[in-house]
Amino acid sequence: MRYLTLLVATVLLAHTTLALNAAISEHDDGKPAVEPFVPTDEFQVIKDGQDIPPGLYVKLDVSTGQRMAKKMPKNEQASSTASHDLIVPEDTKHEMDAQEIAKEKLEDKLHRLDNKQAKHTAPSSRRKPLSRYHQSTDDQRIAHYLVTIKAATVDNKEKHAKLSEALDDLQDLVDDLETGYNFAHGDGIPQAFRLLDPSWPRDIRRKAAIIIGEALSNNPEAQQAARPHHVTTRLLALLGKEHDNEIISRLLYALSSATRGDRIAHDAFYNADGFLLLVNAYERASELHVRSKALDLFIDLLNPDMQSDEAASTTPSHRGLGDWCEALGRTLDLSTSDIYFQLDFVRALVALKEEEARNNNEVLCPTNATITRYIEGQIKAQQSSDENEQELLKLLQRAQHLYKK
């Protein structure tokens, strides 16, 4: 009897021990528990899922995406924080972006984001800024992808597939306003330009141009952060030598994103003979949708309503506008084959004449019989009640009025 009692007690003790171990090693959802972070006077790696107590130094290694933390000395103030460190305030446990602290205080950054100009309000397709907790996670992912990009070389084709996947993910990430800013503020733009070199495969170059465009699109803070990298000038230089329709199209998108609403970018565009390089790309492209993108950028650059007040106050350099007039005259026959291209084409004709009116009637596109006959012929040909056809008719009538003066 005594032996049986001892056996039962042993079994109960073992069962209790196993239950306690299970409770310690797992959450309620059955997943392994994460050990609590115990800060010391030395930096320690913060594991995934670990919560950190407030009042610590937190550091982000931009080359690996790894986060580390340590105790903050009592006699040390926030103003003495190293450039790649930051303090987690006592009233929050959210992680903060270490890369921005070297540039400016967090409060200034948030203030800028809250006061974006109305003319640069992001389209509905663009994501809203994420919470700061998730933003830090995205910045770590960017750092990870930049490591992949830096490790890739033209001759190591085995890594090109991994590089292409990283670029796909980066494109999604930099579409966010704040992450786009951090990408432009860090090493992202130089690395993207490295991949735009003609020695890289077409797919890699195409994606690199898209990423630049996504990061800067409707994002004035990202545009400003990218200025030291001379984005507009470098994109124009690439555009001037490019013959691949798809790459031309993506470079035009990146240029549009870089210049819209940015006076400094406009000046860089004019100083680099941007209108001349743009019209050459327009004529070099062999596909109408690519030519339409060139026309769209041309029209935007001449339209004050598409620019910020600061950019609109800058008078465009007219170098190359005469070349545009001649190029449009040479491609009149192309405009009749596609309604969408024709809309952009006539808008460009109108934009040239309206620019003349804004500049004391300086002649940029002399009225000639060929353009006049084209406009009159197209007006007579418009008989459809289709919405696009009606819009085209109004543009043609506007052009007819302007080119009769």
Image (cartoon, rainbow, N blue to C red):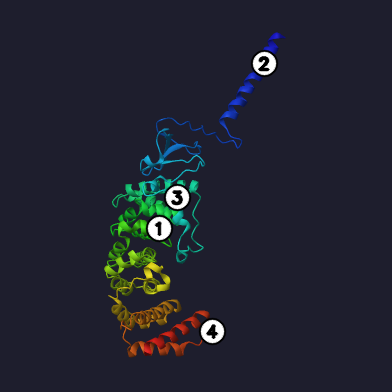
Local secondary structure at mark 4? loop
Local secondary structure at mark 3? helix
Q: Which residue is mark 3?
A: 107
Identified at 37% across, 55% down, the residue is 184
Disc 4 residue type (three-letter):
Ser
Local secondary structure at mark 1? helix
The reply to whether the C-beta atoms of the residues labelled 4 and 1 are less than 8 Å apart is no
Up-down: is 302 above or below 118? below
The reply to whether the C-beta atoms of the residues labelled 3 and 1 are less than 8 Å apart is no
Q: Which callout, 3 or 1, points at the residue further toward the start of the chain?
A: 3
Identified at 38% across, 87% down, the residue is 374
Disc 3 residue type (three-letter):
Glu
Q: Which callout, 4 or 3, points at the residue further toward the start of the chain?
A: 3
Residue 404 place in picture, x, y as percent: 37, 90
Kindly report which numbered mark, 2 or 3, lies closer to the viewer in this rendering.
3
Q: Which residue is mark 2?
A: 9
Disc 1 residue type (three-letter):
Glu
Q: Residues within 10 Å of mark 1 (few under 14, many from 20)?
A: many
Local secondary structure at mark 2? helix
Identified at 50% across, 79% down, the residue is 388
The numbered mark at residue 385 is: 4
Q: Spatial distance from mark 3 to mark 1, Cα to Cα?
A: 14 Å
